[in-house]
Image: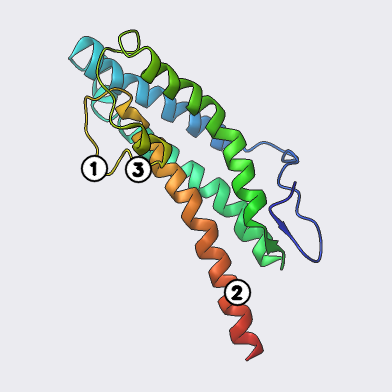
């Protein structure tokens, strides 16, 4: 399955030939930051890890930046080479990567609400449409899915905007 194509195939499903160790390090730092913040907010109620606890929320922002960079870089490099953006392939790949696990966790929250924290989650449709973050209701069950909602909204909009831009550029060049 490819994301971009025409002249030459652009295989997005193949692994990169070399890992970007710096990006892996940033990802690990983001995870550690989020853990320190959550430990402070939900467990110790004090900055157990010092200033790292108080700035740990930055880890989520770092995840957004890394994720955006990685996907946009792959799409932009294909467009720069003249390859066509295949939206159906892109969306199918994203869905297979994130939705199965999300649906399992979501089902657990709705089937076993007591075991999963005891709070009533927002309406199911807000999770299924990835709009649970509009408006965000902190403290509800599975409220931390807001970050996945934002990521899915980004993955929905970026390829559409880029495909429209490529078409517009092509029509302007022809006419």
Q: Position of residue 68 (x, y in %)?
A: 49, 48
Disc 1 from disc 3: Cα separation = 8 Å
CB contact under 8 Å: marks 3 and 2: no
Looking at the image, residue 69 sits to the left or right of residue 113; the answer is right
Residue marked by disc 1? 135
Picture quadrant of residue 118: top left
Q: Is 55 placed left or right of 26 in the picture?
A: left
Residue identifier under label 3:
131
- SS of the residue under disc 2: helix
Residue 21 visible somewhere in the drawing: no
Q: Is residue 18 visible?
A: yes
- SS for callout 3: loop
Alpha carbon of mark 3 to alpha carbon of mark 2: how far?
A: 29 Å
Q: Which mark is residue 163?
A: none
Q: Which residue is mark 2?
A: 167
Q: CA distance from mark 2 to mark 1?
A: 34 Å
């Amino acid at each position: 399955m490819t994301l971009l194509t025409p002249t030459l195939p652009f295989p997005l499903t193949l692994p990169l030939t070399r890992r970007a160790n710096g990006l892996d390090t940033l990802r690990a730092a983001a995870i550690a930051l989020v853990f320190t913040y959550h430990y402070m907010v939900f467990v110790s109620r004090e900055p157990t890890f010092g200033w790292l606890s108080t700035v740990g929320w930055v880890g989520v922002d770092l995840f957004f930046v890394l994720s955006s960079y990685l996907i946009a870089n792959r799409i932009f490099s294909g467009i720069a080479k003249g390859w066509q953006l295949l939206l159906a392939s892109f969306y199918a790949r994203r869905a297979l990567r994130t939705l199965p696990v999300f649906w399992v966790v979501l089902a657990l929250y709705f089937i076993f609400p007591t075991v999963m924290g005891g709070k009533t989650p927002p309406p199911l449709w807000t999770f299924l449409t990835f709009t649970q973050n509009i408006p965000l209701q902190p403290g509800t069950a599975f409220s931390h899915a807001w970050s996945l909602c934002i990521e899915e909204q980004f993955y929905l909009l970026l390829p559409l905007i880029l495909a429209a831009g490529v078409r517009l550029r092509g029509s302007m060049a022809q006419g």
